[in-house]
Image (spheres, helix red, strand yellow):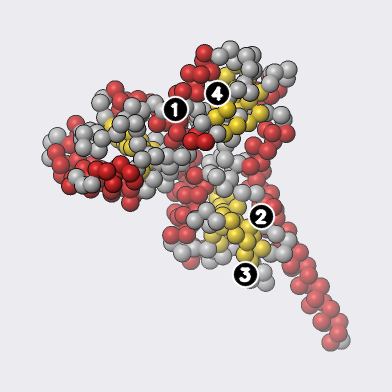
């Protein structure tokens, strides 16, 4: 995206959404005069500002089929920064559709990536967690109140979705930034559901899945799992998670220590760490709160640090520098006070 600005110095450049969920990166694009296309109600966008000959950047989350079709018909230059793992998901749901399967997408229906993914599906239903997946599995086995089912999933299903006919053959895909262990658990549950309904021999004709969690997300989740499992051995004071507050994969990194009862914080930039030893962070419920940070400054601080898949290294380094400076200031003040007390005693 930065190179596009350098490459097209005399053209108006637009981007269809945030490039990634990181405020510093998106702020820099705004400073470079990249125009963020206005969002309207119900996920629509105002493309009236895009003129012929302009440049349009597609973000890492991709763009919907309708958006790409619109730009294909318009005389614009396209800079496609779609993550390869997102493209892999699109290929997966395309296989589902060609095989006559309904795509079950483990993801958040309002997330940019999932919006783009479902645009490639004829029949789909999105489940954001195991609870919703269990609701679908229960309907497959036992049926139920169709009207209530459709009401609950009304924003997460394809037009004309019929749970009585469209849940017999399923293909699982996922938003690439979801919690890997939950996606696997959901997959195993649907596999068992289809075996129960159609028998172990015929189940494979009714269910298909591919692993589409991105490598960078998997590696971070595995690393945080290890930190949590060994938190007492390491003597961790807390785990710091750095990444955009709108970042799905970063939010899932926070959930791992939170579920294990390990003190943890999700910040989106170094400025969240205050000089007064407070920290402004996003909770797992999505609330932005400020509270005391390091509880015992007199001892060595032992912390675990991770970051979202698209968090720049500089954001991590700046956050660590803020903590080191906080500790340094405290130690210097404590040393000065000790020296002053010793002088008084003499």
Q: Earlier in the sequence, mark 3 or mark 2?
A: 2
Pick whichever, 70 or 230, lies toward us: 70
* Image quarter of the C terminus: bottom right
> Is the Cβ of the residue at disc 1 closer than 8 Å to that at disc 3?
no
Pick whichever, 339 or 191, lies toward us: 191
* Image quarter of the N terminus: top right
- Spatial separation of the CA atoms under disc 2 and disc 4: 32 Å
Q: Position of residue 199 (x, y in %)?
A: 12, 40
Which quadrant of the figure has residue 81?
A: top right
Q: Which label sits on residue 272?
A: 2
State the SS at label 3: loop
Residue receiving disc 4? 80
- Spatial separation of the CA atoms under disc 2 and disc 1: 34 Å
State the SS at label 2: helix
116 sits left or right of 32 in the view: left
Residue at image position (71%, 29%) is: 33
- Spatial separation of the CA atoms under disc 1 and disc 3: 44 Å
Residue at image position (66%, 28%) is: 35
- Spatial separation of the CA atoms under disc 3 and disc 4: 46 Å
> Is the Cβ of the residue at disc 2 closer than 8 Å to that at disc 1?
no
Residue receiving disc 3? 295
Residue receiving disc 1? 87
Q: Position of residue 314 (x, y in %)?
A: 66, 43
């Amino acid at each position: 995206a930065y190179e596009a600005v350098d490459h097209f110095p005399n053209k108006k450049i637009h981007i269809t959404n945030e490039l990634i969920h990181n405020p510093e990166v998106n702020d820099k694009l705004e400073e470079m005069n990249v125009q963020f296309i206005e969002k309207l109600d119900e996920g629509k966008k105002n493309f009236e500002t895009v003129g012929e000959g302009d440049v349009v950047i597609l973000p890492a989350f991709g763009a919907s089929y309708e958006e790409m079709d619109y730009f294909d018909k318009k005389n614009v230059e396209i800079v496609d920064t779609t993550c390869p793992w997102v493209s892999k998901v699109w290929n997966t749901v395309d296989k589902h559709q060609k095989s006559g399967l309904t795509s079950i997408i483990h993801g958040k229906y309002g997330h940019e990536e999932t919006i783009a993914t479902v645009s490639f599906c004829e029949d789909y239903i999105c489940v954001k967690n195991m609870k919703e997946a269990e609701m679908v599995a229960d309907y497959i086995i036992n049926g139920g109140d169709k009207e209530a089912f459709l009401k609950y999933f009304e924003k997460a299903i394809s037009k004309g979705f019929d749970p009585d006919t469209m849940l017999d053959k399923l293909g699982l895909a996922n938003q690439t930034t979801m919690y890997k262990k939950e996606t696997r658990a959901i997959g195993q549950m649907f596999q068992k559901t289809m075996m129960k309904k159609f028998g172990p021999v015929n189940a494979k004709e009714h269910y298909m899945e591919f692993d589409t969690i991105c490598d960078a997300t998997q590696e971070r989740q595995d690393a945080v799992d290890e930190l949590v499992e060994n938190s007492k051995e390491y003597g961790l004071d807390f785990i710091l998670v750095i990444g955009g507050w709108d970042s799905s994969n970063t939010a899932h990194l926070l959930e791992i220590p939170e579920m294990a009862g390990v003190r943890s914080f999700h910040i989106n930039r170094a400025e969240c760490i205050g000089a007064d030893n407070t920290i402004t962070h996003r909770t797992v419920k999505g609330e932005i709160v400020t509270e005391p940070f390091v509880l015992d400054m007199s001892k060595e601080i032992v912390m675990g640090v991770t970051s979202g898949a698209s968090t720049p290294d500089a954001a991590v380094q700046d956050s660590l520098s803020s903590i080191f400076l906080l500790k340094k200031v405290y130690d210097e003040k404590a040393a000065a006070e000790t020296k002053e007390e010793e002088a008084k005693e003499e």
